[in-house]
Amino acid sequence: MPIIRVEMFKGRTREQKRELARELTEAFVRACGGKPEAVTVVLSDVDKQDWAVAGALMADKYPD
Amino acid sequence: MPIIRVEMFKGRTREQKRELARELTEAFVRACGGKPEAVTVVLSDVDKQDWAVAGALMADKYPD
Amino acid sequence: MPIIRVEMFKGRTREQKRELARELTEAFVRACGGKPEAVTVVLSDVDKQDWAVAGALMADKYPD
Amino acid sequence: MPIIRVEMFKGRTREQKRELARELTEAFVRACGGKPEAVTVVLSDVDKQDWAVAGALMADKYPD
Amino acid sequence: MPIIRVEMFKGRTREQKRELARELTEAFVRACGGKPEAVTVVLSDVDKQDWAVAGALMADKYPD
Amino acid sequence: MPIIRVEMFKGRTREQKRELARELTEAFVRACGGKPEAVTVVLSDVDKQDWAVAGALMADKYPD
């Protein structure tokens, strides 16, 4: 029944998300047991103008 | 002062969201008391490529 | 597959949480359709010293 | 290592987000100590049709 | 800069949490690239009386 | 109507939380406008065994 939530920069491909969901689910089962069917993964794309470290927006620090 | 947050698949209409906000607010008040004015509801639409169960993206399991 | 999350003040009884989980699940199904089995509810108790409105801790505004 | 997350109405400019990230980071350091480099801020724009108070969608209460 | 958040039942040991944090971090890097140093993991223990599926508290469905 | 959420290490005093709530609320209003009454702050204490960077639990990296 675990829920795994990921916030990450926008721009991952469908293929990367597919891999990520599979990998995270297997990682949970390896570490904590249980069945993969019980694991939910929710991915969140975050824009670089909505993420800051040390008070500076990533959009300013790493412009496209 | 409760905050109710819902993550659900993208695609609900404005009318469904209106009903949902009203229903959840009333549900909270019936179960726990308090006033409806104190209840905040935040809805989050999640894309099928951002939601996985058992390690498989919903976008792969239920393609449009 | 919706996930409903509630942040509320600490102190609800088991019976109130039971009612709340049932009510929220039914509310979702009435408004948006789907099956109750697909609905997950996660409740979070928040201490009054961890909740503020207008910059004032609830623990200060409403001491026990 | 604190993470500060803000849910707010859609529509803030890049300049407001820049100010907000800087201000929140400084606010944390003033109140709790630590270094700005350790503070992460994540901003979330919420649509008025996804936010309700007292059971009423903000999009209905404050139409554009 | 990804943040991975896990909600799971209370009761995992320190050793399981250690494994979980390591496994999730490696899973992210394998699927999406980047460096492990950039990955933050936050774990949340959820009590069985705070988790419901199909409107029924896990504490009622699976009493200790 | 903004909601500001902070995840931080356990151990802040009531006085620090009071300052933090006040500072964050003022920071929001300075950057984005609006009234302090509309700002909600929710604080979350995270245990060092529930927080990892680079795959290592803070409880291992910085034991008490």
Image: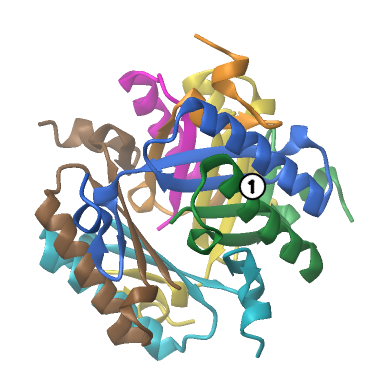
Chain colours: A cyan, B yellow, C orange, D green, E brown, F blue
Q: Where in the figure is residue D50, as x and y percent of width and height?
A: 67, 53
Residue toward you, B46 or A49: A49
* Left or right: A43 as drawn, with respect to A45: left
Q: Residue at x 63, y 44 (%)?
A: F3
Q: Residue at x 23, y 64 (%)?
A: F56
Bin the neighbour count of mark 1 within 10 Å (Cα to Cα): few under 14, some 14-19, many 20 and up: many
* Left or right: A38 as drawn, with respect to D30: left
* Quadrant housing residue F51: bottom left
Q: Where in the figure is residue A15, as x and y percent of width and height?
A: 39, 90
* Left or right: A26 as drawn, with respect to D45: left
* Left or right: D49 as drawn, with respect to D29: right
Residue toward you, F62 or A12: F62
Q: Dividing the image into 4 quarters, which one contains the C terminus of chain A?
A: bottom right
Q: Is residue C35 visible?
A: yes
Q: Is residue A5 above or below residue D58?
A: below
Q: Residue at x 24, y 50 (%)?
A: F49
Asked whether residue C35 is drawn in magenta, I would say no
Q: Residue at x 12, y 56 (%)?
A: E16
Disc 1 target residue: D27
Count of labels in the image: 1
Type of amino acid under label 1: Ala
Residue toward you, C29 or E36: E36
Label 1 marks a residue whose chain is D
Asked whether residue C8 is drawn in magenta, I would say yes
Q: Where in the figure is residue E55, as x and y percent of width and height?
A: 35, 38
* Quadrant housing residue F35: top right
Name of the residue lying farthest toward the top? C64
Q: Is residue B13 visible?
A: no
Q: Where in the figure is residue E54, as x and y percent of width and height?
A: 33, 44
Stretch in magenta: C1-29
Kindly state the secondary structure of the residue where label 1 is placed: helix
